[in-house]
Image (spheres, rainbow, N blue to C red):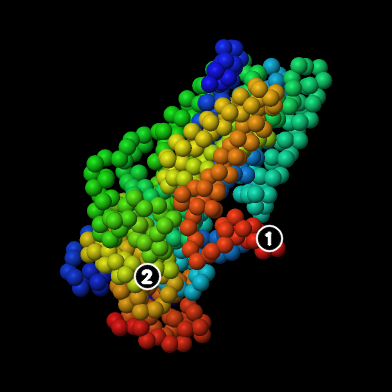
Amino acid sequence: MDVLLEPLQYGFMQRSLIVAVLVGLICAVVGSYLMVQRLALLGDAISHSVLPGLAIAFMIGANIFVGAFIAGVLSTMAIAWIRTRSPIKEDAAMGIVFSACFALGITLITLIQRDNKIDLNHFLFGNILGVSVAEVWQTALISLLVLVVVKLLYKELLFYTFDPVGAQAAGLPTNLLNFGLMVLIALTIVASMKSVGVILVLALLITPGATAYLLVNRLHQVMLLGAAIGIIASTSGMYLSYFYNLPSGPAIVLVVSGLFGLALLFSPTHGVLTNPQPSLQEPKVWRELKGLLGRH
Amino acid sequence: MDLPINAFTSAYEINIDVPARLERAIAIQHLGVQYRSVQALRDITLTLEPGRLVGVIGPNGAGKSTLLQAMLGLVPVTHGSVNYHGKPLASQLDKIAYVPQRSQVDWTYPATVWDVVMMGRIRQAGWFRSFSASSRRTAEAALERVGMSAYRDRPIGQLSGGQQQRVFLARALTQQAEIYCFDEPFIGIDQRTEAVMFEVFRELADAEKHVMVVNHDLGDAIAHFDDLILLNTELIASGTRRQVLTRDHLYAAYGGKVAFFSGEAA
């Protein structure tokens, strides 16, 4: 225990811990909506699209969180615009928009990097040990806002994400709900940029909810258990980053992916190895391997 | 094809004040829907009166589901209007319970039967509020009515097709609407569910509600409906079953594909 508590005497570790807990929490809550709507790719699209906004904000001396947030929301609008105004399908629209934005972001940051002390890698892969006091406050404010909105709109968002047509027919303002959801996702990604980085934030959005989904049956349970899983992953990743000098994003993602793997294999209801499938005598591991090979 | 609508005749039959019934009628005028280059519905004019169990029939791609969705404003209407109480129906969605095709939603969604039925009370509960005790009682009664009380806490992914459809029916009942619209509710369900559904439809019609059911199948079940709307992009016929199910109308709608008609027992 001392091994874990001892680093916390440093101010930067305390700040990292707060950010890790908050980011693990809100990513799982908001990401659950992406998972149930099969919109995982949208999370990826928004996260890659925040980079140019961040770079432009840095260039003109504005708050980089605000710049990143605006770029994230604009990217979702660009995707929707391409989808409705052309025969291009949504997944292709996402792919086009996010790779274009990502390319622009990398170009801009590379240009800034030459004469400023800004490290592209920190935005791409996260640097949770380097968060400032101001960033802790920003993350805390965003987290509070996100959680309050999810709490207030919980039943409407449940209806909308389960049955969008039914929700529209019941008179709910589904366009507004959808836009609100996009704003929540963009805010969450902006808050997580510093700890996991834009490339891997998708894992923290999707994997905790997906893990919880294998274990519980209702959306709010998925969110709560997902939040616990997300917090465990983000704090473990933070310690791994501290002890082994790893970039925090990959460390967090490896932990959360490991937890998902355990749930996938051993979940009481959906586990590959625990789910009873009678009439088969051979060991289950062997059966799964054969199934994988047999698909070719 | 300007067929007389049965608004007057049936009202005389059961001797209800005609103006009052007409006031609660749904008036569809010259309704047209176009998707890009495809005309899905053309110039539909109809009057629907309350208290009748109405089936919407026609071949695949005839625009049956589109008719419901256009009435509720769920698809862009390119022509015409749909009025109820003299105002656009699409602006009175609180009076409507719409049940989409079962295949339109993801039944692996992490929700229980109770979660889905309570969705019917969200609009009534209002923003930022939790459900009232009376909302919960309404939902419990609806679940009881469709015989699904025992499944209240069951994840929806574990239900059979018929049970899923009954959950949707219960959700519609909890909305306590004036107009009930069902899109293909009989696909992939069991006999018992079909029986429960027609019982509930009849109760709603007896309570002077509007009940519209899209049904692609011309099987025996069609004898349950009072009135029919026969579509094939245009309105082929509407009125009582007997008025609609004629050889000429069916030929106009289906071409030569339905050669017989034996199920008619009107």
Q: Quadrant of residue B132?
A: top left
Three-letter amino acid code at the position of disc 1: Leu
Q: On the picture, is B265 further left or further right than A68?
A: left
Same subunit under labels 2 and 1? no
Q: Residue at x 76, y 31 (%)?
A: A106
Residue ID for mark 2: B190
Q: Chain of mark 2?
A: B
Relative to B105, say whether A117 is above or below. above
Q: Is residue A218 visible?
A: yes
- For the C terminus of chain A, the quadrant is bottom right
Looking at the picture, tell me which residue is in the foreground, A30 or A182.
A30
Give the numbered dot on residue B71. Answer: none
Give the numbered dot on residue A293. Answer: 1
Q: On the picture, is B113 further left or further right than A59?
A: left
Three-letter amino acid code at the position of disc 2: Asp
Q: CA distance from mark 2 to mark 1?
A: 38 Å
What x and y, as percent, mark residue B168? 37, 57
What x and y, as percent, mark residue B82? 40, 57
Q: Secondary structure at mark 2?
A: loop
Looking at the picture, tell me which residue is in the foreground, A260 or A78.
A260
Looking at the picture, tell me which residue is in the foreground, B126 or B168.
B168
